[in-house]
Image: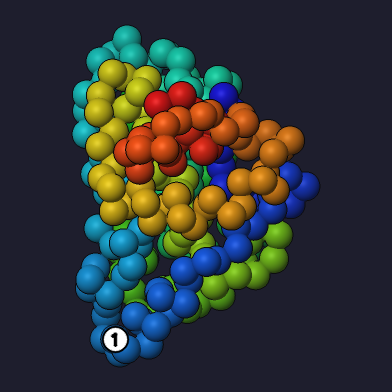
């Protein structure tokens, strides 16, 4: 299994997800002139199921789990959580209009220090606050491959959290429990893109599952994980 970082800032390896439902995000915010509530966002951009799930799964981890392997073969549990924290820390700056060059290397290295759960909680809460500001889904975000809107960035971040939430839960023996609504929304968004990702370092090849498999199983299998 390979690491996945859909919002990678390496222009040599990144091909952006193309939005299939971003207009839903945009329409919702255009109808909401005040600060948006979570109900203004489509399912993948509402209450951050990945955020709360990741916190529970980290809390489920024992001290010995931090060095344990994950479905992302190059990452331990600690490496995976560090990646998740890194991605969350970028959100406020990117939604504020900063470029990759502006941010530089300030989020490189070990971000967890001696309290991984605190690092995750603080970074994810800051990211959530940035998403809930007016205009977050229609703002222009400057990523390494070029400019995109906040709605597409939201899809990328949601996919990253959903898949890595499953990775983390699997690594520590917990139930990811993504829920059918979130898993289906992400599955429908990424399915048209998967063929273009084959041969990259992002995912292993899709894993066959029964036609009647649950949405969570179909999502992780499509992205190269054995549910």
User: Which residue is depicted at the point 55% across and 66% down?
Assistant: 19
The quarter of the image holding the N terminus is top right
**164 vs 16: above or below:** above
Q: Which residue is mark 1?
A: 32
User: Which residue is depicted at the point 31% across and 19% down?
Assistant: 172
**211 vs 100: above or below:** above
Please indicate whether residue 2 sits to the left or right of residue 118 in the image: right
Please indicate whether residue 14 sits to the left or right of residue 131 in the image: right
Question: How far across and how far down the image is residue 209, in percent?
Answer: 45, 30
User: Which residue is depicted at the point 47% across and 69% down?
Assistant: 21
10 Å neighbourhood of mark 1: few (<14), some, or many (≥20)?
some
Q: Quadrant of residue 127?
A: bottom left
Q: How many marks?
A: 1
Question: How far across and how far down the image is residue 93, in percent?
Answer: 49, 62
The residue nearer to you, when weighing 221 against 15, is 221
Question: How far across and how far down the image is residue 36, in percent?
Answer: 27, 77
> Does residue 102 show up?
no
Does dot 1 land on a helix, a strand or a loop?
loop
The quarter of the image holding the C terminus is top left
Question: How far across and how far down the image is residue 97, in percent?
Answer: 54, 72
User: Which residue is depicted at the point 44% across and 50% down?
Assistant: 187
> Does residue 193 show up?
yes
**211 vs 133: above or below:** above
Colour option used: rainbow
The residue sitting at the right extreme is 12
**103 vs 217: above or below:** below
The residue sitting at the top extreme is 64
């Amino acid at each position: 299994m390979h690491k996945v970082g859909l919002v990678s800032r390496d222009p040599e390896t990144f091909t952006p997800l193309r939005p299939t439902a971003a207009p839903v995000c945009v329409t919702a915010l255009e109808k909401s002139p005040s600060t948006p509530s979570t109900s203004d966002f489509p399912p993948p951009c509402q209450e951050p199921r990945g955020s709360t799930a990741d916190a529970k799964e980290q809390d489920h981890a024992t001290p010995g789990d931090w060095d344990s392997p994950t479905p992302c073969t190059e990452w331990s549990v600690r490496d995976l959580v560090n990646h998740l924290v890194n991605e969350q820390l970028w959100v406020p700056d990117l939604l504020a209009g900063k470029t990759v060059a502006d941010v530089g290397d300030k989020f490189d290295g070990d971000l967890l220090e001696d309290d991984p759960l605190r690092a995750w909680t603080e970074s994810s809460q800051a990211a959530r606050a940035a998403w809930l500001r007016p205009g977050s889904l229609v703002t222009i975000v400057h990523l390494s491959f070029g400019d995109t809107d906040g709605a597409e960035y939201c899809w990328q971040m949601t996919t990253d959290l959903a898949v890595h939430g499953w990775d983390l839960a699997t690594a520590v023996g917990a139930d990811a429990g993504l829920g059918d609504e979130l898993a289906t929304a992400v599955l429908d968004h990424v399915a048209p893109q998967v063929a273009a990702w084959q041969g990259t370092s992002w995912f292993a090849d899709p894993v066959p599952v029964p036609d009647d498999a649950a949405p969570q199983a179909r999502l992780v299998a499509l992205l190269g994980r054995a549910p």
